[in-house]
Image (cartoon, rainbow, N blue to C red):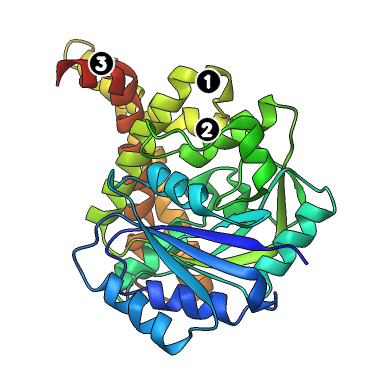
Amino acid sequence: MPKVSVIVPCYNEQATIRLLLDAIYTQTFPLNHIEVIIADGQSTDNTLEEISSFQRQRPEMVVSVVENLQRVIPSGLNRAIEVAQGEFIIRMDAHSIPAPDYIETSVKALQSGSGDSVGGVWQIRPGATTGLARAIAVAASHPLGVGDALYRIGSHAQEVDTVPFGAFSRGLVDRIGMFDETLLTNEDYEFNVRVRQSGGKIWLDPAIRSTYFARATLRELSNQYWRYGYWKAQMLLRHPKTLRWRQALPPLFVITLIGFGILSIGLPFVRWLLAVEVLVYTTVLLCIGIQMSIKNKDAALLLGVPIAIATMHLTWGTALLWGLINPASKINKKT
């Protein structure tokens, strides 16, 4: 029976870290073959107290905490990997709750040779009880909001370009290296790019399931997608051939809005093009809002879903363009 190291980057997760630890404790995989390593980015809330409480109540599960002094996800992952003793490493997120057979199913997929890095699908849940939080959760799992991101919408096992919170062998890390600490976001995608470049395979299995809590407010959502977009740009500057169609559409949409807006000042017919583009986009979003509202019997989704999807598109697209114009390397040289 192989030993598994569960690594968790964490910062101010007092509301969910205990849920994650409880879910790991009840896994179908033997508890004495699991170690949990939490890389804490100097949390200022009660996260560490929640972890200590769990350690006292469940001493039979090995849970350790390492410091993540850089306070960014990839450095936290690497600090955890450095002390991990497992043959297999499974990344989890403090915002998620793995299904009871998550570890067992992940290990079986790795042992069967399905992929060098394997992962599953998210069952996205609201981050709060408000109508807007429910709308954000629906938007975060809708094809128009996330394109062909199969870990959010996939229904059958298949080879993919990336998976969230992947599982992989320690040998893979020794072969391709750890996570890129200069990428504050998109580090998992970049890691999986190197897996594929080395001849490895990324495998998505819907049997590997976890619940993921979406952001609760538009401000949190926009901050999240700004980070996603900006750091996706940094990743594309290094690996331009990894651009997917779903990732190109939001920045193209932002470009047309800006371009048509400028040209419409002196060209009246361009105003019509801009009006048509905005009208079509708004109509499509409203139709989705109506559809989701009826399907889920939730009136809050009628306007909430269109607003959330528009926030995702515009923030991500603008951030990606900004990241291409002002790359992190350029900013670092100035500071």
Give coordinates of residue 11: x percent, y percent: 30, 59
Judge whether residue 140 can be spotted in this image: yes
Residue at the image position 62 percent from the left and 31 percent from the top: 176
Classify 10 Å Cα crowding around label 2: few (below 14), some (14-19), many (20 and above). many
Give coordinates of residue 202: x percent, y percent: 70, 41
Q: Amino acid at mark 2?
A: Glu
Please report whichever mark, 3 or 2, sits nearer to the chain's N-terminal start.
2
Asked if residue 56 is positioned above or below residue 260 in the image, the reply reads below
Residue at the image position 15 percent from the left and 16 percent from the top: 334
Quadrant of image for the C terminus: top left
Please report whichever mark, 1 or 3, sits nearer to the chain's N-terminal start.
1
Closer to the camera in the image, 173 or 299: 173
Q: CA distance from mark 2 to mark 1?
A: 8 Å
- Pointer 3: what residue? 330
Quadrant of image for the N terminus: bottom right
Classify 10 Å Cα crowding around label 1: few (below 14), some (14-19), many (20 and above). few
Q: Which element carries disc 2, helix, strand or loop?
A: helix
Q: Are marks 2 and 1 in contact (CB under 8 Å)?
A: yes
Judge whether residue 271 can be spotted in this image: no
Q: Which element carries disc 3, helix, strand or loop?
A: helix
- Pointer 2: what residue? 190
Q: CA distance from mark 1 to mark 3?
A: 17 Å
Asked if residue 265 is positioned above or below residue 215 in the image, the reply reads above
Write down the quadrant of residue 90 in the picture.
bottom right
Residue at the image position 56 percent from the left and 80 percent from the top: 25
Write down the quadrant of residue 210 in the picture.
bottom right
Q: Amino acid at mark 1?
A: His
**In the picture provided, is 223 more to the left or to the right than 213?**
left
